[in-house]
Amino acid sequence: MVLIKSKPQHLMHTGVFPNSFNSILNSFFEESGIRSNPVNFMPQADIIEKDKQYEINLSLPGVKKEDVKISLDGELLTVEGERKLENTDEKRGFLKREISYGKFSRSFTMGKVDAGRIEAVFNDGILNISLPKLAEEKATTIAIK
């Protein structure tokens, strides 16, 4: 079994007031079409363990391939990037804005993987990362002469 550590920012308490009070204020402003505290973009992930590899699929709609960075430090895989707001024309007349933009970072603690064989493919807003597992060292019996 693999332990996966993640700290989605939208689930963390960061304000002075309890979450319930913040949610009351946010719902008031959202009903009027104003976002009081825009949430940063946090991509969703599916993590699959197979016999010989792990697979991570991240949903990155609106993110360009060149705005994503993947790194591996020991058993910690980190995906960082940014979904940029391309057109900030204030004349567009938004009644409500729900699409989140900004920088993101997701980290996953994986088992031992073969760093030289990791592959990443970005297609139709989905980043697929394949992490081949290292072959487990099997215990051997040594004959005494």
Image (cartoon, grey):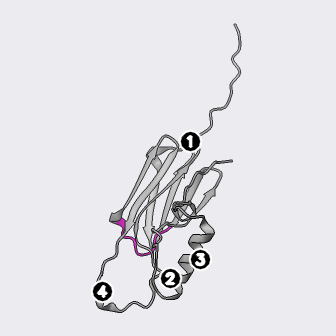
Q: Estimate the spatial distance between the alpha carbons at disc 3 and disc 2, rounded to whole Å.
A: 9 Å
Q: What percent of the width, then of the height, locates residue 113?
A: 53, 44
Residue 8 position within the rendered picture, expressed as x and y whole percent measured from the top left = 54, 60
Q: Secondary structure at mark 2?
A: helix
Q: Residues within 10 Å of mark 1 (few under 14, many from 20)?
A: some
Residue topped by disc 1: 112
Q: Are marks 1 and 3 in contact (CB under 8 Å)?
A: no
| Circle 2: residue type | Phe
Q: Residue 62 lies in magenta, yes or no?
A: yes
The residue beneath circle 2 is: 29
Residue in front for this viewpoint, 44 or 37 = 37
Query: In the depicted view, which residue is nearer to us: 41 or 121?
Result: 41
Q: Look at the picture and state if 94 lies above or below 75.
A: below
Select label 3 or label 4 by which is in front. 3
CA distance separating discs 3 and 4: 27 Å
Secondary structure at numbered mark 1: loop
Q: Given this view, does label 1 or label 3 mark the residue nearer the observer?
A: 3
Above or below residue 91? Residue 76 is above
Q: Earlier in the sequence, mark 2 or mark 4?
A: 2
**What is the three-letter code of the residue carrying label 4?**
Glu
Position above or below: 73 against 91: above
Q: Are marks 1 and 4 in contact (CB under 8 Å)?
A: no
Q: What residue does disc 4 label?
A: 90
Which percent across, then down, holds residue 77? 49, 50
Could you tell me how far apart the alpha carbons at marks 1 and 2 are, in whole angstroms?
47 Å
Residue at 53% x, 87% y: name it. 31
Q: Is residue 54 rendered to the left or right of residue 96? A: right
